[in-house]
Amino acid sequence: MLDKLIRKIGGREEPDLPGPPDSGGAGVPGHIAIIMDGNGRWAKKRALPRIAGHHEGMKTVRKITREANRLGVKVLTLYAFSTENWKRPKPEVEFLMKLPDEFLGTYLPELIEQNVRVETIGNGESLPEHTKRAIRRAMDETAGNDGLILNFAMNYGSRAELTDAMKAIARSVGEGKLRPDEITEDMIAESLMTAHLPEPDLLIRTSGEVRLSNFMLWQLAYTEFFFTDTLWPDFDEAALQEAIGVYQARNRRYGGIGKEGVK
């Protein structure tokens, strides 16, 4: 049934790819985070079930990963499944839990060839065993790669992440290892799941929604945001380059005075 639906969807020809965006100004962002939204609406517009949109969105993950790697992005964090997504209908959740098996089972050799390293953030213990197994295999087989980090946020929620970080710091205080006045922003950042990663330079959200949806609330404090009406399955290499171009034109001041001397 699904194969028939995918044939109905049809494929798009790969576009001719230009060179990287202008590296002037802010340059190519080192860390791009994406809230991949709009799979269900993409399917609805075509009178297809929501799972068909998720399957097409998986193909977009491959395209955007390849393009980000080609452009020299160092980290690509994709919001794949939130802690709130468990509220969706059970058949849809079960399908979403199978996508890592299919994506990594199909594209892992390509990721290895492209020197991509797979990582995850989120509560992995609550994922089905087959999902955890696929992710562990991908992480193990790409552990030696030193190119783009493809970081999947699976069963991730920023408030839960921050709560866990506060609990860990509180335990240190309770054990007498730390005084409350010694707690710093750096200490909090080092207690998060992303402690080993740079904070995102650019956040992209597709489908026209303009909110963070419990995604990297601490890490995005000084990130540049790019919102687009494009649905995730339609987000292609040109769309990524557009987002990077907008990012490059911005003046990142971090609360100080910008390049033109304007606060």
Image (cartoon, helix red, strand yellow):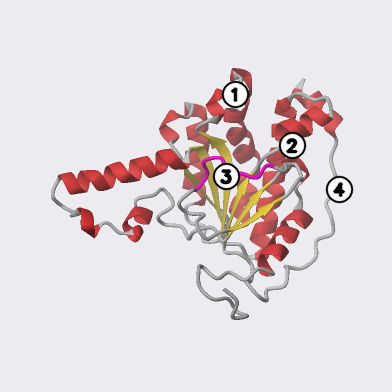
Q: Which of marks 2 and 4 is nearer the N terminus?
A: 4
In contact (CB < 8 Å): disc 3 and disc 1: no
Q: Residue 231's image quarter?
A: top right
Provide the residue designation for mark 3: 212
Query: From mark 3 to mark 4, how far is it between C-alphas?
Result: 32 Å
Q: Residue 88 carries which label?
A: 1
Residue type indicated by callout 2? Glu
Provide the residue designation for mark 4: 13
Residue shown at 30% from the left, 59% from the top: 184
Foreground: disc 2 or disc 3: 3
Query: From mark 2 to mark 4, how far is it between C-alphas?
Result: 14 Å
Viewer-proximal residue, 41 or 122?
41
Query: From mark 2 to mark 3, how far is it between C-alphas?
Result: 23 Å
Does residue 123 appear to the left or right of 97 in the view shown? Answer: left
Provide the residue designation for mark 2: 56
Magenta-drawn stretch contains 69: no
Tell me where residue 220 appears, x and y as whole percent. 51, 54
